Amino acid sequence: MSDMIIFGGTVEGRKLAEHFRDKDLNVTVCVATEYGESLLPEGGSLRVRSGRLTQEEMCELFKEEEPAVVIDATHPYATEVTANIKAAAEQAAGLEYVRVVREKDSGGLCSGRYCKDIPEAVEYLNSTEGNILLTTGSKELASYCGIRDRQNRVFARVLPLTKVVEQVEGLGYKGSHLICMQGPFSEEMNLAMINMLNIKFLVTKDTGESGGLPQKLAAAEKAGIEAVIIGRPEDDKGISADQCMRYIDEKFERKPQDEKPRRKVTVCGMGTGDEGMVTAAVKRAVEEADIVIGARRLLQTPLTREKKTLEEINSNRIVDFIREHEEFLNIAVVMSGDTGFYSGATRLREILSHEEDVELEVLCGISSAMYFLNKIGVPWQDVTMHSAHGRECNFVGIIRRNEKSFFLLGGDMGPAVFMETLTENGMGDVDVCVGENLSYENEKITRGKAEELSSATFDPLAVVYVNNCRAKNCVTTPGLSDQSFVRGKVPMTKEEVRAVTLSKLRLTEDSTVYDIGSGTGSVSVECALHCYLGHVFAIEKSQEGYLLTTANKKAFGADNITVIQAAAPEGMESLPAPTHAFIGGSSGNMREIILSLYEKNPKVRIVINTIAVESLAETAALLKELKIKDVDITQINVSKNKRAGRYNLMMAQNPVCVIAFGGETGETMKEDENEE
């Protein structure tokens, strides 16, 4: 007889087994393999059964054991097993079924390409070149046999078990392409394997933190390769292992034997660097802490030198350490500057606020921005503040629009590159102030024009204040003069048509825009100047158009334009999803382009310009065929004056049709119930 049966040789299953081992409960744990059995804790009230069970065998087990609860803690991708457990539980009268699910990737770990299933991943990998590391386990390896040139490209990582090796060798995974290792795998181990095998694509399931997903994604990002993530079954719903333990404890009216003490974690802003800039509250928190976690520089101060320390800056690894080391009841995590200004404290706050046994406190510090601006006598309420340290930042566009700007610099974007970029984009005459080693004895503040300082030597980790007195005259409405663009034989969208086009696009300052068939790049430039916190991808297949768009990007200092010489939609495949798209030329691929845009973002806002009546008719028919409902078509007839002696003659231009549809509020690609 059993009070409860647990299915699962997973991390969650082992966690539940360990929790209930010493409780006054009769618990049977079912695992599929002897290897899974070997990982379970021994002793206590646990009984372990190894071997795969059919649905009928599960029904027999439930009749024999008569449990009150069956807990399904099997792998999130073991959909067939879950279906069998659920069906068998439904046939047993009065048996409660509880599904334990693994926490998913929160979205902040790393970017990757998500595929809904293995066939979609195989299809994508067949469109690529380069070696592939499969880290999805041995069960589905047969599904990857369709990968092109598999024998040379694919490396499979599986458990070091005889049955597993025999199985996968039978599928053709052999020799150096078969890696038999037991995890868990650290970021460093994953990275070493990627580098050793010259991997270009790492394939993984969305296994969450307990399945090693953060370490895989971090290694892929550090190696500069793409992670291909197989999505979970959409209908896999349940509760976490911790929630399950509390629920079962309450159900059987048994309180946890060892109630976890509530621990305190204090995230501390350490100020600009000098110990005198640390607040009294932060000093007290560090002094009282059992351990201090942070970057090496912050752990070498007199305040932290005598403390037990851990050198770590990765938020996920810091949280893992806190979870795994319950012996530390008072933990201080130290951050440079202030905790609210481009700080790792944001991610820590997000994760730790959900930890039930953690009391979280965040203490602010003196930021480098406040210190530096006060030092140079600039009230910081008038200054727009940004970071170009390790993140994309169109500082040229920001400075163009704002009289007073502050930037954190570091990494590849040091002061020298910053000054050179401003100078190349026609802003070499702006006033700049650079701060280095703030609050230390070797503090240095340098003033001058951007062009003057472009050849100077600075510490890469610095701050910059820029004063652009011309920003007051920055025009923010569309409609740049046609004469201001570099011209060639490639057609250009005229200024009045551009103004209406941008109005129909409904851009925001941080939009991601595709300009498909960019031509001279006039629309790209207008979009980039408006979306100065976003990015524009100009896609142009002709050499002349590509060169003209590039020339106009430089002429207008539109540093947030990426020019791509390619035809659409092929040239769009590797780009981030657009929020807006302008189609000025499709080369006969309108259907494919629109479908590709909607695949990337079903809520994308699209504007198409046409001149020929045939093109208008073809586009309208296509939109009807695709069942796009919110179409707005505007015909623009523009006449411009032309001097003829002492007279002005109004000269008509070609009428242009501007077709707009989609966006957040648009009803696109929906079935029309009333359509004849």
Image: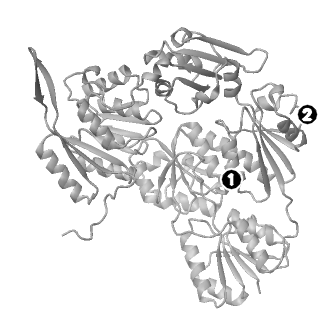
Identify the image quadrant of the C terminus: bottom left
Q: Which residue is mark 2?
A: 306
Residue 94's tag is none
Q: How many marks?
A: 2
Q: Nearer the viewer, residue 556 or 175?
A: 556
Residue 394 picture location, percent across and down: 49, 29
1 vs 2, front mark? 2
Using a 10 Å C-alpha cutoff, classify the residue at mark 1 as few (fewer than 14 neighbours), some (14 to 19) or many (20 or more). Answer: few
Q: Which residue is mark 1?
A: 183
| Mark 2: amino acid | Glu
Q: Are marks 1 and 2 in contact (CB under 8 Å)?
A: no
Q: For this view, does 163 lie left or right of residue 292?
A: left
* Residue at left offset 79%, top offset 80%: 252
Residue 315 lies, with reference to residue 103, above or below; the image says above
Q: For this view, does 442 lie left or right of residue 469?
A: right
Using a 10 Å C-alpha cutoff, classify the residue at mark 2 as few (fewer than 14 neighbours), some (14 to 19) or many (20 or more). Answer: few
Callout 2: helix, strand or loop? Answer: loop
Q: Nearer the viewer, residue 199 or 331?
A: 331
* Residue at left offset 66%, top offset 45%: 347
| Mark 1: amino acid | Gly
Q: How far, Cα to Cα, is label 1 from label 2? A: 35 Å
Residue 302 appears in which quarter of the rendering? Answer: top right
